[in-house]
Image (tube, helix red, strand yellow):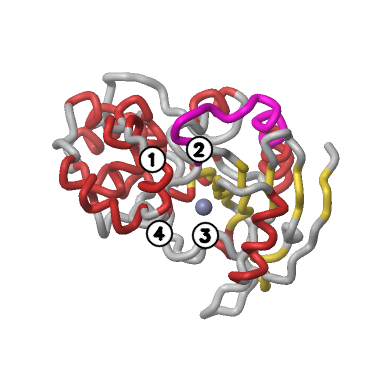
């Protein structure tokens, strides 16, 4: 695997702000972006942001920050009660012309993603439930890597978790509210509907309402995600029985892994 180096100076050390102790790498955050690596590097320079890796549509991998350093990609949010996601994670950006919402990711790009991610998983022994979307940790702000990111297939290759389809739900899960189920999985639930929406995008992409897939202004909608989201969430129906069942299946699997 060839990795092109293009170092950026936007990073700091992986240190706990309160205890000042070093933080170990134990998460991977998946992002996507409209821009090519070259364009993204310019944007990162303008905004003083970074990620560890960018993967181009043709499969080229560009490294911007050394894995040992804390890159600036995740922003405000949390996953499984961890707030400083940047300190814990490796951030990987995938270039995608429709932000992962209207067309699949090219296989050549996914192959690079698989190789790179498996290497990171093995090196740091990252647990499947610690590999997640930017939209999972920041559901009110972010939409990436989109409904076409193939979580189900990647889990077959040992990347991330795809809980089994089952009706056998233990009692300690069965009686939890939707909010509690989302929290058990890892979602921040200050905005419960936004968290549910992020859950659907990750674990039931076929349930994402038409509003998001058919609109001609799709990219514009995503571009102004934060301001458009409340209008969409207003129309989000109450979770159906199948959605609640899927929430229970995922919560059941993720709960075991505390
Ligand atoms: Zn992102």
Q: Which residue is disc 3 drawn over?
A: 74
Q: Which mark is residue 37?
A: none
Q: Residue 114 location in percent, x, y?
A: 67, 33
Circle 1 packing at 10 Å, graded few (<14), some (14-19), many (20+), is some
For marks 3 and 4 on the same chain, the one whose residue lies earlier in the sequence: 3
Asked whether, in this view, residue 251 is left or right of residue 233, the answer is: right
Determine whether the beta carbon of the residue marked 3 sits less than 8 angstroms from the nearest atom of ligand 1.
Answer: yes
Q: At 51% across and 33% down in the image, what residue appears?
A: 149
Q: Which residues are magenta?
A: 99-113
The picture places residue 221, in percent across and down from the top left corner, at 36, 47
Describe the element under mark 4 as helix, strand or loop. loop
Alpha carbons under labels 2 and 3: distance apart: 20 Å
Q: Earlier in the sequence, mark 1 or mark 2?
A: 2
Choose between 96 and 201: the one closer to the eye. 96
The verdict on residue 100 being magenta is yes
Residue, disc 4: 81
Nearer to us in this view, 51 or 186: 51
- For disc 1, the marked residue is 218
Whether pointer 1 and pointer 2 mark residues with C-beta atoms closer than 8 Å, the reply is: yes
Res 123 → quadrant:
top right
Cα–Cα gap, marks 3 and 4: 15 Å
Choose the circle earlier in sequence order: 1 or 3.
Answer: 3
């Amino acid at each position: 695997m060839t990795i092109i180096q293009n170092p950026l100076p936007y990073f700091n050390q992986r240190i706990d702000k309160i205890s000042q102790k070093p933080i170990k790498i134990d998460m991977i955050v998946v992002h996507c972006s409209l821009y090519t690596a070259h364009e993204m590097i310019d944007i990162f320079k303008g905004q003083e942001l970074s990620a560890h890796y960018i993967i181009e549509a043709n499969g080229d991998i560009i490294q911007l920050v050394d894995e040992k350093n804390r890159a600036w990609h995740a922003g405000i949010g949390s996953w499984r009660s961890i707030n400083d996601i940047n300190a814990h994670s490796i951030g990987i950006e995938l270039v995608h012309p429709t932000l992962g919402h209207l067309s699949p990711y090219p296989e050549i790009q996914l192959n690079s993603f698989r190789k790179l991610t498996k290497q990171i998983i093995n090196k740091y022994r990252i647990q499947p439930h610690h590999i997640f979307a930017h939209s999972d940790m920041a559901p009110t702000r972010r939409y990436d890597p989109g409904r076409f990111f193939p979580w189900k297939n990647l889990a077959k290759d040992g990347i991330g978790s795809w809980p089994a389809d089952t009706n056998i739900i233990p009692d300690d899960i069965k009686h939890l509210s939707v909010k509690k189920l989302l929290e058990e999985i890892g979602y921040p639930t200050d905005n419960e509907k936004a968290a549910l929406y992020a859950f659907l995008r990750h674990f039931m992409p076929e349930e994402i309402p038409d509003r998001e897939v058919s609109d001609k202004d799709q990219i514009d909608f995503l571009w102004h995600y934060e301001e458009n989201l409340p209008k969409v969430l207003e129309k989000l129906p109450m979770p159906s029985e199948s959605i609640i069942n899927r929430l229970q299946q995922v919560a059941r699997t993720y709960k075991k892994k505390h």
